[in-house]
Amino acid sequence: MAAISSNGVYTNWSAVKGKFSSLCYDGQSENVAFLTVLPPNAPSCTNDGNGNADATSPVLSASSYHVGGVHCLFFDGTVRFMSNNINTGNLGVAAALGGKSPYGVWGALGTRAGNEPVSAQ
């Protein structure tokens, strides 16, 4: 389920719950996490309509109010802007459980399992 607003634009998942970045200490995945599968600012999806509890199977995209992408903080302390158009590989394949990510550069940034080198954009 991806929420679509009245103007036909996908609604940010956190905004669906009406709590965009207001519960960063809550611990619910939809408030503090994202997956490097869908590109930044893509619609997030879940099979759970409960707005007051953890979603059971969310696929959460990184979201931002920045136009065209999101800022990402890396473990080395650098912050980089990632475009909504970053390479996401083949979104039609199932998730890999170990090894390289099938989700392009964006997927490689979210795993260390495949030892993928990631060059600067």
Image (cartoon, helix red, strand yellow):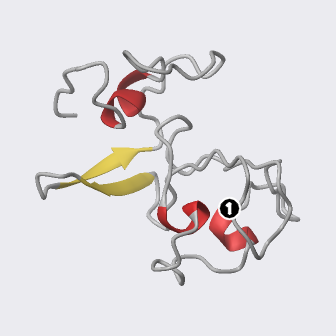
How many numbered marks does the figure carry? Answer: 1
Closest to the observer, 94 or 39: 94
- Give the vertical position of 7 relative to 47 (above or below): below
- Residue 86 in percent (x, y) is at 41, 33
- Give the vertical position of 61 relative to 67 (above or below): above
- Using a 10 Å C-alpha cutoff, classify the residue at mark 1 as few (fewer than 14 neighbours), some (14 to 19) or many (20 or more): many
- Residue 68 in percent (x, y) is at 46, 51
- Give the vertical position of 15 relative to 105 (above or below): below
Q: Which residue is located at x 60 percent, y 62 percent? A: 30
Closest to the observer, 8 or 58: 58
Query: In the visual, does 73 lie left or right of 77?
Result: right
- Residue 1 in percent (x, y) is at 83, 47
Q: Which residue is located at x 72 percent, y 61 percent? A: 11
Query: In the visual, does 7 lie left or right of 82?
Result: right
Where does label 1 land, which residue? 13
Q: Which residue is located at x 73 percent, y 52 percent? A: 56
Query: In the visual, does 104 lie left or right of 39?
Result: left
Q: Secondary structure at mark 1?
A: helix
